[in-house]
Image (spheres, grey):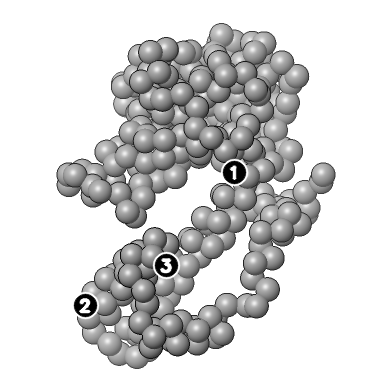
Amino acid sequence: MTDTSTSTAAETATESYKIAVIGAGGKMGMRVSNNLDKTAHTAWYVENSPAGQQRTLDAGRRLTDAATAVADADIVVFAVPDLALGPVTADLVPQMKSGAIALTLDPAAAYAGLLTDREDVIRAVAHPCHPSIFLQRQSPEEWADTFGGIAAPQDAIAAIESDDPAKAAIVEATVRAIYAPVIDVHFVTIKQLAQLEPTLVETVACMIGALLNEALEETINTMGVPEAAARSILYGHTQVALANGLRGDNPFSDACLIAMDYGRESIIKDDWKKIFRDDELDKNLARMLHLDHIER
């Protein structure tokens, strides 16, 4: 599908669907299930591990065997790790009803071709954006929810290999339910979602976040700057840097621009934008999925 949002929250909220959650007792599965509990959707929860089963039961949810759960589901949410998606979809996709949707929560395995497909089962992928750094939070609960899916509103990205608006509506309604509260659902292609996650947000943004922490530790432990002072100036200037760099809120000073050039020359490779090439995306995903290579 193209990069547009589909129907509004009010429109999708009028319909309820049958949703099966595979891996309901895992880390992401619990987040998904906690939110589904608050909706009018019919939900079945599937979990194989004893620990996950206990977490599901402790949350007050009933367990259903996988075959029963997927047989009549409009959409099956595969909330399992990437490395398990191959064998799990190989087992369950053949048992899904015709016209159902197989939804994974990360694009890596789908883009790499590791999932079992069926001609009459629709593939879809979704991923949360997490609450924006520019979100106008209104409560302590929203401030505490940095990941999303609890109190702070967030956007979500989705991809579906179907041009049927009714199927897209099911995906959007499910995404709005499992990642609630959701502001917008942006539809892209599976490849574009893989270019966003991991390339844009993990390879670049998360790496820079970790680099900031390394620089903070170096400032404290090697340079001997008091920790409170170092954290205060870094936290404040990180907000300014992101607001200026991403939104152009204020211009960087001339001296700052010179220091930024020095940082780029010292830290960034000249060819760093190669990470956006298809072959580099394949290389990155192969490493993440512990594969020798990704075949096309």
Residue wearing tag 1: 193
Mark 3 or mark 1: whose residue is earlier in sequence: 1
Comparing labels 3 and 2, the label whose residue is closer to the camera: 3
Residue 175, horizontal then vertical, whole percent = 46, 29
**Alpha-carbon neighbours of circle 3 within 10 Å: few (<14), some, or many (≥20)?**
few
Residue 136 appears in the figure: yes
Residue 92, horizontal then vertical, whole percent = 65, 21
| Relative vertical location of residue 124 with respect to residue 216 in this rendering, above or below | above
| Relative vertical location of residue 183 with respect to residue 46 in this rendering, above or below | below
Mark 3 or mark 2: whose residue is earlier in sequence: 2
- Mark 1 lies on a secondary structure that is helix
Residue at the image position 17 percent from the left and 44 percent from the top: 139
**Alpha-carbon neighbours of circle 1 within 10 Å: few (<14), some, or many (≥20)?**
many
Which sits in the foreground, 15 or 74?
15
Residue wearing tag 2: 228
Q: Quadrant of residue 59?
A: top left
Q: Are marks 3 and 2 in contact (CB under 8 Å)?
A: no
